[in-house]
Image (cartoon, rainbow, N blue to C red):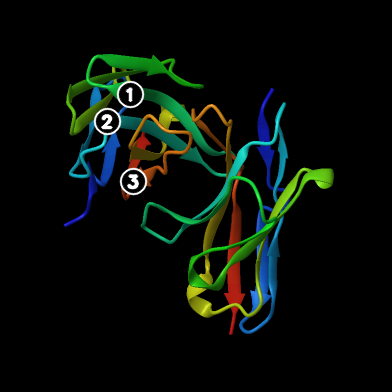
Amino acid sequence: DADVTQTPRNRITKTGKRIMLECSQTKGHDRMYWYRQDPGLGLRLIYYSFDVKDINKGEISDGYSVSRQAQAKFSLSLESAIPNQTALYFCATSDGPRLFNEQFFGPGTRLTVL
Amino acid sequence: AQSVTQPDIHITVSEGASLELRCNYSYGATPYLFWYVQSPGQGLQLLLKYFSGDTLVQGIKGFEAEFKRSQSSFNLRKPSVHWSDAAEYFCAAQNNAGNLLTFGGGTRLMVKP
């Protein structure tokens, strides 16, 4: 079984709808991250959490919110989806704290907002 | 501001040819540097990383990368490309406080038979 899973893998929705993307991990890591990937822009950080009680905004948090329900679960919500939120979304996890913490990525969720 | 740049958006090489993917970084101090690969429909997989020491680092799948401080570069190389190497490649940097990754825009590699 995959260590980092994301559901759904694909989603098409309409402008104004509320959407939740879910991430679960079995690696026992404390740190979890949400990124979005757009062509030519690489991955940009939306939110991150270093433990269950810690939530931090990333580079592009506007229009998004997150919930860390447990060590293993980190959900990303789009309260009112808009077309420019169409992207590939990745969840990642890492251990910590150390100088270097390799991040392990889920398979991604492709979201289309019409 | 910290940034990572991959100048080539697309690269096409013939199978068996050598490969070099470019990466430049702009950081206050030398960051930790990484190369990730994203195969179609997959998440990102770490190919290799550089912290300090030897400037030539070896990774998985026959890849290597060379750190050049004078050029602020960390280019990825492979002597002989296989069709299965077709993917998108991301260079990333992390400051040495162990915090967050900054990614380049990615380079999509296509391999001709």
Label 1: element kind: strand
Going by the numbered disc 2, the residue's amino acid type is Asp
- Left or right: A81 in relation to B10: left
**Image quadrant in which you'd find residue B95:** top right
Q: Which chain carries label 2?
A: A
Q: Mark 2 points at which residue?
A: A30
Residue A98: x, y in percent? 42, 33
What residue is drawn where x is 32% and y is 30%?
A31
Q: Name the residue under label 1.
A: A50
Closer to us: mark 3 or mark 1?
Answer: 1
Residue A70 against residue A107 in the figure, above or below: above
Label 2: element kind: loop
Residue B79 against residue B50 in the figure, above or below: below
Residues at marks 2 and 1 touching, judged by CB atoms closer than 8 Å: yes
Q: Mark 3 lies on which chain?
A: A
Q: Name the residue under label 3.
A: A108
